[in-house]
Amino acid sequence: MTDTNSLDMQGLMNELGREARAAARLLARAATGQKNAALAAAAGAIRQGRQVIRLANDQDMAAATAKGLAGAMLDRLMLDDRRIEAMAKGLEDIAGLPDPVGQEIARWQRPNGLDIARVRVPLGVVGIIYESRPNVTADAGALCLKAGNAAILRGGSESLHSSRAILACLQQGLSAAGLPPTCIQMVPVADRAAVGIMLRMTEFIDVIVPRGGRSLIERVVAESRIPLFQHLEGNCHTYVDGAADLEMARRVVMNAKMRRTGICGATETLLIDRRVAASHLPVLVGDLLDAGCEVRGDAATQAVDARVKPASEEDWRTEYLDAIISVKVVDGVREAIEHIDRYGSHHTEAVVTADEATAAEFFAGVDSAIVMLNASTQFADGGEFGMGAEIGISTGKLHARGPVGVEQLTSFKYVVRGSGQVRP
């Protein structure tokens, strides 16, 4: 570990910023083929370096276990051969996406003959601050590269060895394609002071993307002088309507909660229409309890199974990121919408119903980045949306909302073509 006491932290971060800004100027003009070649070479390097990555991850896992990190955090941190292959495949998927840079979003002509086009351009330099997920190193670096942006990554101390090993593969791919390795850089120290400096680097960084727990997001929101793509929490809901097929509801609810409990798209609250409480509630609650999920419910839910614990007011607001779910019986879709509006985090909500009018009312009434019909909330992921991967989920309403992929990592400029026009 670098001894941060001997470093000029501000100078170190400024140097990263200068190199990133220079790299961004080159990337903005890089050909699609060159960017794709870098991604393909990086995917190959990840596969070839699988053992090195696994050994680095073993170091991180051992240290995290010794520190007593929760099971959900350990799951996020762990890399096995399947997840490493998924990283490599993700890079290839991103390479296969259309290049957004230079795309015409719209074009029109004015009566005076001016030809005006709105054209996608890179954002410039993207700073990504994340915690325990080392795969973010690959996803974020690759997405920024494809969108023509330089990236400055600041991974968590828990994943430092893993992230460095992955970064080495990305930079190997860049060099193989004739691009500077400084297109993707990582803050080389674990000192949290680096985050504070990074959030003030308005001269060098154009947007910050934080990915992590509530304390990290709150700090970034409070301190950043740079625009953000962020979401505070993933308090996601699944509403089982009175017109829901029971077997479909069982599949969707179990997957939405239990497939991976530690991701931001996991359902944390289950809402059930009172019309089917007698038929659906005992079955759905029983499935969850039998699968090892702790259920915290309202009075109606507690009545169906003695294993259900009472839910507090705080439970409705909680993103558990664990095998815990809160369950409530509601009087139809309108009360479900009201509950989500009061307690939700504007991330992802799902409705299970065969009634198209109910689905339409849910879609219109729920103000979240992603709304789903008859599908698991765990599909809230850029890869599942066909974006190759995502740099994060944005619950804001400006520029990017939902999964942030290559298109969302671009802005636009107006290209105006004339033939000597002057304004009267």
Image: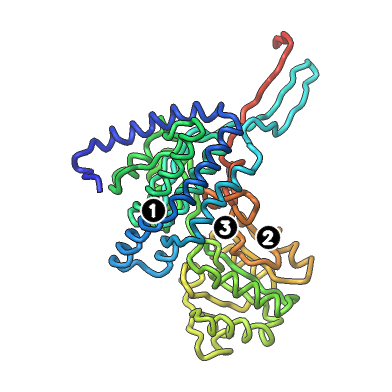
Upstream in sequence: badge 3 or badge 2: 3
Is 308 on the left or on the right of 349, as rendered?
left
User: What label sits on residue 346 in the rendered view?
Assistant: 3
Q: Judge whether 331 appears above or below 164 on screen.
A: below
Considering depth in this image, is 169 or 333 the residue closer to the camera? 169
Secondary structure of residue under mark 3 = loop
User: What label sits on residue 365 in the rendered view?
Assistant: 2
Q: Residue furthest front?
A: 48
Is 373 on the left or on the right of 180, as rendered?
right
Q: Is the C terminus in the top left, top right, bottom left or bottom right quadrant?
A: top right
Quadrant assignment, res 281: bottom right
User: What label sits on residue 211 in the rendered view?
Assistant: none
Q: Mark 2 to mark 1: distance in Å?
A: 49 Å
* Residue assigned mark 1: 52
Tell me, yes or no, if residue 212 can be seen here: no
Is 107 on the left or on the right of 291, as rendered?
right
* Residue at the image position 50 percent from the left and 53 percent from the top: 231
Q: Nearer the viewer, mark 3 or mark 2?
A: 3
Estimate the x, y position of residue 379 in percent, counting from the top left.
62, 61
Q: Nearer the viewer, mark 1 or mark 3?
A: 1
Q: Mark 3 to mark 2: distance in Å?
A: 12 Å
Quadrant assignment, res 341: bottom right
Q: Nearer the viewer, mark 2 or mark 1?
A: 1
Estimate the x, y position of residue 84 in percent, counting from the top left.
48, 56
Q: Mark 1 to mark 3: distance in Å?
A: 39 Å
* Residue at the image position 67 percent from the left and 32 percent from the top: 103
* Residue at the image position 56 percent from the left and 26 percent from the top: 29
